[in-house]
Image (spheres, rainbow, N blue to C red):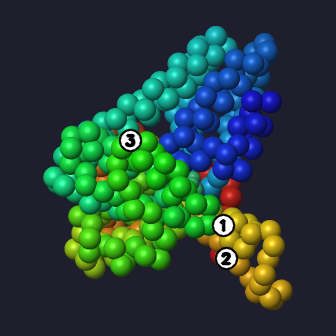
């Protein structure tokens, strides 16, 4: 029950944003494990593997999801007894959730040092990590105002302006296509990310790459706030991050006014090349995108042999 509800919440975007998706999946595994009445380790592991696969199939782009699931499931996979597996599942899920919140705090602390006095900041989509950075700088008295985009078609920008306004930060709400017009007025752009690939590219809400391009053109810093579990280990093997394509109705509304032969394309994310990313701020430090493989190998601790065993992305959307 908890599992199907969580899977549905994530795929329908009632739970959204890469960090929240990851924490919610970890909590669902924990709760599901506690509800099982298995008599053997093999039965328990089998049930948990099925649960892990269901959760990993809900949204394809946010790599935080398989990374969280892998972290939690490692406790089950390495356990020698049923009791060990149950305890490890519970402990690792709690640890992941705790560390995830702590990572956002640390990122905010580090990123705030990058924000100059009287800063004008642009952000896109709704990222807890990016907003934490802006709020921290605001608490230090450094933020003059923020430009927040609308984020068609799902309008996550409304959540962002609410959060920034609640924190007492002056916000200018702009349509996505106004980003270039306002870029000369901003000092820097901060966004979150759903995935950072082995070459340091940043996969985030559709429109991010256009904003990064405008920032580059206007010589403004483009900073990405990314917990280390947003780095995508399997991209080291050349695997690509699948871009989620969502239903046409999100763009057209249910009363479609388009000619019947017209197709609607609705990719939810795009890829910003590393050349347009000035800095990636993680809980272990701020660095250039070229550092991404080091994070994957040394910090996430992925060993090449593990790649073969873990989950492949199960969805391929769109083109
Ligand atoms: C959300 C989005 C966010 C990242 C990072 O997309 O693109 O920028 O997930 O968010 P969606 P956070 O609304 O489609 O899930 O920093 O909160 O993890």
Q: Which of these two is toward me, 22 or 57?
A: 22
The x and y percentages for residue 279 are 27, 57
Q: Residues within 10 Å of mark 1 (few under 14, many from 20)?
A: some
Give the number of the disc on residue 195. Answer: none
Of pointers 3 and 2, the one earlier in the residue sequence: 3
Task: Tell us which disc is closer to us: 1 or 3.
Answer: 3
Q: Which of these two is toward me, 145 or 318?
A: 145
Q: Which residue is mark 2?
A: 265
In whole angstroms, how far apart are the C-alphas of marks 3 and 2?
A: 35 Å
The residue at the far left in this view is 117
Residue at disc 3, secondary structure = loop
Of pointers 2 and 1, the one earlier in the residue sequence: 1
In whole angstroms, how far apart are the C-alphas of marks 2 and 1?
A: 8 Å
Of pointers 1 and 3, the one earlier in the residue sequence: 3
Residue at (67, 76) in percent of width and height: 265
Picture layout, residue 7 above or below residue 199: above
Which image quadrant: the C terminus? bottom right
In whole angstroms, how far apart are the C-alphas of marks 1 and 3?
A: 33 Å
Residue at (80, 68) in percent of width and height: 254
Give the number of the disc on residue 167. Answer: 3
The x and y percentages for residue 273 are 38, 70
Residue at disc 2, secondary structure = loop
Task: Tell us which disc is closer to us: 3 or 2.
Answer: 3
Look at the numbered discs 2 and 1 and tell me whether their residues touch, using CB distance below 8 Å: yes
Q: Note whether residue 61 is visible.
A: yes
Relative placement, left or right, of 255 versus 15 is right
The residue at the far right in this view is 260
Q: Which residue is mark 1?
A: 245
The x and y percentages for residue 200 are 36, 61
Q: Is mark 2 within 8 Å of ligand 1?
A: no
């Amino acid at each position: 029950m908890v599992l199907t509800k969580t899977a549905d919440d994530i795929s329908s975007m009632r739970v959204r944003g890469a960090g929240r998706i990851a924490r919610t999946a970890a909590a669902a595994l924990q709760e599901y494990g506690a509800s099982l009445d298995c008599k053997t380790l093999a039965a328990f592991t089998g049930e948990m593997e099925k649960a892990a696969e269901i959760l990993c199939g809900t949204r394809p782009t946010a790599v935080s999801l398989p990374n969280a699931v892998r972290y939690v499931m490692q406790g089950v996979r390495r356990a020698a007894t049923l009791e060990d597996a149950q305890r490890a599942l519970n402990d690792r899920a709690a640890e992941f959730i705790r560390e995830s919140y702590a990572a956002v705090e640390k990122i905010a602390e580090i990123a705030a040092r990058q924000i100059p006095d009287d800063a004008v900041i642009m952000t896109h989509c709704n990222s807890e990590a990016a907003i934490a950075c802006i709020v921290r700088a605001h608490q230090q008295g450094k933020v003059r105002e923020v430009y927040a985009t609308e984020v068609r078609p799902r309008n996550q920008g409304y959540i962002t302006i609410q959060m920034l306004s609640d924190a007492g930060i002056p916000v200018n709400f702009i349509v996505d296509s106004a980003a270039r017009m306002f870029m000369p007025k901003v000092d820097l752009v901060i966004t979150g990310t759903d995935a950072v690939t082995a070459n340091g590219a940043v996969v985030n809400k559709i429109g991010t790459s256009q904003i990064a391009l405008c920032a580059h053109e206007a010589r403004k810093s483009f900073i990405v706030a990314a917990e280390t579990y947003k780095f995508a280990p399997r991209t080291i093997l050349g695997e690509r991050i699948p871009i989620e394509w969502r239903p046409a109705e999100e763009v057209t509304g249910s009363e479609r006014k388009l000619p019947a032969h017209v197709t609607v394309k609705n990719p939810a994310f795009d890829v910003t090349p590393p050349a347009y990313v000035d800095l990636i701020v993680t809980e272990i430090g701020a660095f250039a995108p070229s550092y991404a493989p080091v994070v994957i190998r040394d910090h996430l601790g992925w060993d090449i042999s593990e790649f073969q065993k873990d989950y492949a992305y199960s969805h391929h959307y769109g083109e």
